[in-house]
Amino acid sequence: MSTSAQRRIWATGTYSSLVCARVGSPGPKLTAGRPAAANRATSVQPSFATGAPPDAAMSFLIDVVGIAPATNEADAPMNIELPLTDEPVEGVVTDDVVEGDGATLHEGQDAVVNVYVVCADTGALIDSSWERDRREVIPTEAGSVMEGLRQGILDMRVGGRRIITVPAELAMGETGSPELGVDSNQDLIFVVDLYAILGDDPTATTEVTESTDVTESTDSAETTEG
């Protein structure tokens, strides 16, 4: 099972154990009902466990990697000014209407977001995740999601809101999506709120210390002499 799939498995009985959990470094397991850190183990009665046999209990080890606020349809950016246009869009265009102050999203990570999608020419609503109980998790690996959206959310910062205008060829192309009301060659506009990032920062590097350099030089010299 993939890491992303594991993150999406939830059981009702785990919710109360996550209250007051903090995002951050793993810590001791939950013992005697007292939360110690963001890495927690909790036991769940069978009636609350998803997919478990009737006579079995389950234990969960949960890393809290991000927090997404509860939202509803009324929170959707219905009144935001969008760059509607009848002209064909050239390339992915982004506009950070709210600058986030959290971590930066890089390729290879997953974004926890809300997404509001409209037709670029008419503003007709296509979809809004604000209408659903759970936030969307969007992977950023190439080929994993609509290419224009993938490109558009990269380099967002947590806490930010971005308007992304996507040309048809990087959206649903000539096929469109009749079930969603998207015509052939339809440009799209996305409004994305980024709440959390899942996965390690692929741009992080390990600093080489002076002691490491000395050791490597010594080893090299010994090899040469031999």
Image (cartoon, helix red, strand yellow):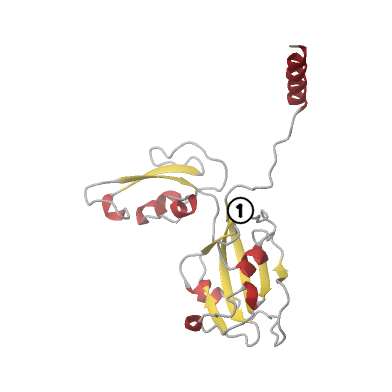
Image location of residue 79, percent across then percent down: 63, 81
Quadrant housing residue 225: top right
Q: Residue at x 56, y 74 (%)?
A: 75
SS of the residue under disc 1:
loop
Q: Is residue 16 left or right of residue 186?
A: left
User: Could you classify mark 1 by the number of other residues whose Cα lies within 10 Å: few (under 14), some (14-19), or many (20 or more)?
Assistant: some
Q: Is residue 21 left or right of residue 205?
A: left
Q: Residue at x 78, y 26 (%)?
A: 210
Q: Is residue 49 above or below residue 79?
A: above
Q: Is residue 78 visible?
A: no
Q: Quadrant of the C terminus?
A: top right
Residue wearing tag 1: 108
Residue type (three-letter) at the residue carrying disc 1: Gly
Q: Is residue 31 above or below residue 145?
A: above
Image location of residue 147, percent across then percent down: 62, 67
Q: Is residue 221 above or below residue 61?
A: above
Image location of residue 179, percent across then percent down: 47, 82
Q: Residue at x 45, y 43 (%)?
A: 40
Quadrant housing residue 206: top right
Between 210 and 177, the residue placed more toward the observer is: 177
Between 194 and 44, the residue placed more toward the observer is: 194
Q: Is residue 112 left or right of residue 225?
A: left
Q: Is residue 225 left or right of residue 81?
A: right
What is the count of numbered marks? 1
Image location of residue 164, percent across then percent down: 67, 72
Q: Is residue 19 above or below residue 150?
A: above
Q: Is residue 102 visible?
A: yes
In the displayed orientation, state which residue is furthest to the left: 55
